[in-house]
Amino acid sequence: MNDADNTQISASQPLEERLNNRSQRPSSDAFKAFMASNWAPFREQLPELDAVAGHAAGRRRAISELFKGERLVIPAGPLKVRSNDCDYRFRPHSGFAHLTGLGLDHEPDAVLILEPSDEGKGDDGGHHRATLYFRPLAGRDTEQFYADSRSGEFWIGARPTLAEFKAQLGLETADLAELELAITKNVGAPEIGGISIRLVRKVDENIDALVDTARYNTAKDPENLDLGVLDALDEKLSEALSELRLIKDEWEVEQMKTAVAATVQGFTEVVKALPRALSHPRGERVVEGAFFARAREEGNELGYDTIAAGGNNATVLHWTRNTGKVNAGELLLLDAGVEADSLYTADVTRTLPTNGTFSEIQRKVYEAVLDAADAGFAAAQPGIKFRDIHTAATTVLAERLAEWGLLPVSVEEAISAEGQQHRRWMPHGTSHHLGLDVHDCAQAKRELYLDGVLTPGMIFTIEPGLYFKAEDLAIPAEYRGIGVRIEDDILMTADGPVNLSAALPRKADDVESWMAGIYQEVEAQLP
């Protein structure tokens, strides 16, 4: 065969099929027939109802109350390509996970649809009937079973059947093949008997395109259809889903406690790994790896990229390269969180002396940040505004900076709206909501978030810091290269705040004792 023949054969193979060349899969009828035979039967016993099912139903009921008569479309999202034919581990959209109760890496391309019903005639007395559309487990007599590397059981393991998910979630299920009709049927203006759609956008481009096409095809005047107006309606659904998560139910609180407990263990593993980190040219990666191992052992994943910042890198707020050295005598700022199998994540920061003991100046800065964190915690009481936590914490920082002679103005001028000079060394916010997303409820309205009132069931961080960059000529040299942040995860109750991450030492003396105890334990286990 000459080169021209080879070129012709290559050109005749569709580009998308070439991804499967590496599999060298037989295509003979004999192979297909043999592959389809002599397999054990599928699982016959249905799973029990998940503990989260009732809570998820209550969340759907709350959303139903806000959007009577409208079809609500909440996609999980598709797989995302990392490189060529390799995907990232799947993680569904948080709104989808919240309304279904599904965690882990279940069901790329799935879509939850809340179909409007007569008022009060829907699920749980609501105004919608919910159906989960997903790609069910393919039979072992199908080619998908062994040929589809993204969804075939031979490649990725067993997947649920329609009946299994229905039993597990207490939720009607349907094959993904029925999705297009479910989204597009009877779409149109309500005044002419049609059904309007609200969609969580920018999760699945294919669903976005399907909804936009349905809207265009059924519009009375498609040439003048203002998609911007429709997008704004969609945004209201995303906003409502975000605001629904501001108050956590009992099940969510337990998931957060699980995530925090695993995170505490991860910090312990990091201290155990510090001696090796000190001797490694990329010690920050040693730290990152020690925490990641615990996250995968105890949970689903990291809740976000770990910040393992030694020395001056600790003054870079989102230092996630983690390529630097960890030097004796410097500080290590570790900002990390384990994501539980339910997808709820912790978010904790501690700043550790790499040799186990704070220097005098390190302790001075550390204790100022701790005082600020304590002030924020004391201020966090039911009924106050969320933003008041930040005010309480940063006022303490301004006072310390003034005492040290670093503020160019008085404390009063600095903390005024016209001043804010102290924010040079603490430019981020002190608190954010926490849950399914590390920065949870981010689409909530300002009046419910920053200006919202602290309410039992809220979970949020308190995380003041001071960051004195090595390049900062506005401060004496002794401060330069020191970055400190202390972050805890807080549950608001009717009796006040509860520190979910209190098991990790916070006071400087306690941090030193904790680290010393871990080193002694490790040494005792050596042969």
Image (cartoon, rainbow, N blue to C red):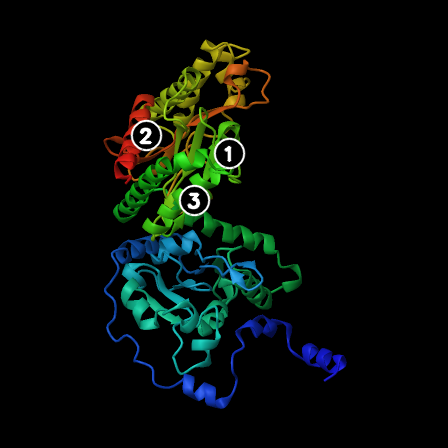
Mark 2: give few (<14), some (14-19) or many (20+) Cα within 10 Å: many
Residue 390: in sight, yes or no? yes
Mark 2 falls on what kind of element? helix
Of the two numbered discs 3 and 1 in the rendering, the one whose residue sits closer to the viewer: 1
Q: Earlier in the sequence, mark 1 or mark 2?
A: 1
| Amino acid type, callout 1 | Lys
Q: Closest to the observer: 463 or 308?
A: 308
Q: Give me the residue at 71% from left, 80% from top.
A: 6
Q: Which residue is mark 2?
A: 515
Q: For residue 19, which quarter of the picture?
A: bottom right
Please indicate whether residue 380 sits to the left or right of residue 90 in the image: left
Q: Earlier in the sequence, mark 3 or mark 1?
A: 3
* Location of residue 29 in the rendering, given as x and y in whole percent from the top left corner: 49, 90
Q: Which residue is mark 1?
A: 325
Query: Could you tell me if the residues under marks 3 and 1 are in contact, i.e. CB atoms within 8 Å?
Result: no
Mark 1 falls on what kind of element? loop
| Amino acid type, callout 3 | Gly
Query: Could you tell me if the residues under marks 3 and 2 are in contact, i.e. CB atoms within 8 Å?
Result: no
Q: Give me the residue at 35% from left, 37% from top.
A: 272
Mark 1: give few (<14), some (14-19) or many (20+) Cα within 10 Å: many
Q: Please tell me the numbered disc located at residue 289.
A: 3
Q: Closest to the observer: 111 or 253?
A: 253
Q: Give me the residue at 42% from left, 37% from top.
A: 276
Residue 450: in sight, yes or no? no
| Amino acid type, callout 2 | Met
* Location of residue 435 in the rendering, given as x and y in whole percent from the top left corner: 37, 44
* Location of residue 446 in the rendering, given as x and y in whole percent from the top left corner: 46, 36
Q: For residue 61, which quarter of the picture?
A: bottom left
